[in-house]
Image (cartoon, grey):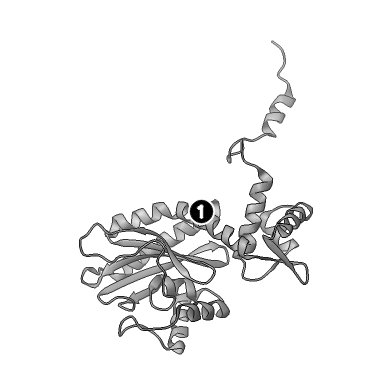
Amino acid sequence: MPPVKEETTVSRARKPKDERGPYFVQVVGKALDIIELVGQSVEPLSLAQIARAVRQSKSSVFRVLCTLERKGILVRKPGDLYAATRAANAATSHQSVGKLLQAAEPAMRELAREFRETVSMAVLFENHIGVVAVTDSPQKIRMGNVVGGLIPPYASSLGKCITAHQTEAIRDHLLRTYGINPFTPNTITDEAQLDEEYRRVREQGFAVDREESTLYGCCFAAPIWTSPDRVTAAISVSFPKARLCEEEVILNAVRGAAKAISGRLREM
């Protein structure tokens, strides 16, 4: 019996199966990762920050950055910092929303099954917050939402949840863009009260809409951490006031769903 060649085993061990598939182009994947990273960053990023985040060498990342800059996807700012252009923001939005929908589907389905009420997810875009997914309640009387609909950053639980975790400049931009007008007698329109509400949302890790956007409707939302240090999405469940159950049960379920989505995003 011929001896087994040791190098055969070693060579196989050095060629693990690529779970992304045989047609995955690494340089394209790397470029998309960089576009998403820079597009989601509030501040411009340095070469070292980007290389560290995508776990690639500086020389390799630098070539990609130069290409993206020449194509108008990124722009180089003073201090050799890179920021996203509108083209990058558009690409980031589509890519990020696609990943988010994939990550959120099981959690949204479970929330809808548990409460039989409308479950929604919203995302922060360049100058507004928009609904990207809705699972409607099967009941005749229900709270509604529409994919593509705009979310008020100050009245809805989804809007408050996302807006609370932004910088002061972004919060002001969202409020000025949407405007601050009352939907019901319960809507918070005073800016000092809104600042306090946003602080409370950040501290408690959830937001509640108590008939602030629609009379006789209550909504509970929790933030989705789309990156380790940034919230750009939230998930909610909405109830007609007459069917409202124990709030602690609802909040635990919504926060659990948001945590599960955030975890899945980190793994993708």
Q: Residue at x 45, y 77 (%)?
A: 178
Q: Residue at x 62, y 61 (%)?
A: 87
In this view of the protein, which residue sits in the foreground, 202 or 20?
Answer: 20
Q: Is 93 on the left-hand or right-hand side of 51?
A: left
Q: Is 223 on the left-hand or right-hand side of 92?
A: left
Q: Is 111 on the left-hand or right-hand side of 13?
A: left
Q: Give the image quarter of residue 81.
A: bottom right
Q: Give the image quarter of residue 222.
A: bottom left
Q: Picture coordinates of residue 45 (x, y %)?
A: 70, 66
Q: How many marks?
A: 1
SS for callout 1? helix
Quarter of the image that includes the N terminus: top right
Q: Tell me the kind of residue under disc 1.
A: Lys
Q: Residue at x 36, y 68 (%)?
A: 251
Where is 226 relative to 26, above or below?
below
In this view of the protein, which residue sits in the foreground, 100 or 144?
Answer: 144
Q: Residue at x 70, y 19 (%)?
A: 4
Q: Picture coordinates of residue 43 (x, y %)?
A: 65, 71
Q: Is 143 on the left-hand or right-hand side of 164?
A: left
* Residue highlighted by disc 1: 99
**Label 1 packing within 10 angstroms: few (<14), some (14-19), many (20+):** some
Q: Picture coordinates of residue 263 (x, y %)?
A: 50, 56
Where is 1 relative to 95, above or below?
above
Q: Picture coordinates of residue 268 (x, y %)?
A: 54, 51
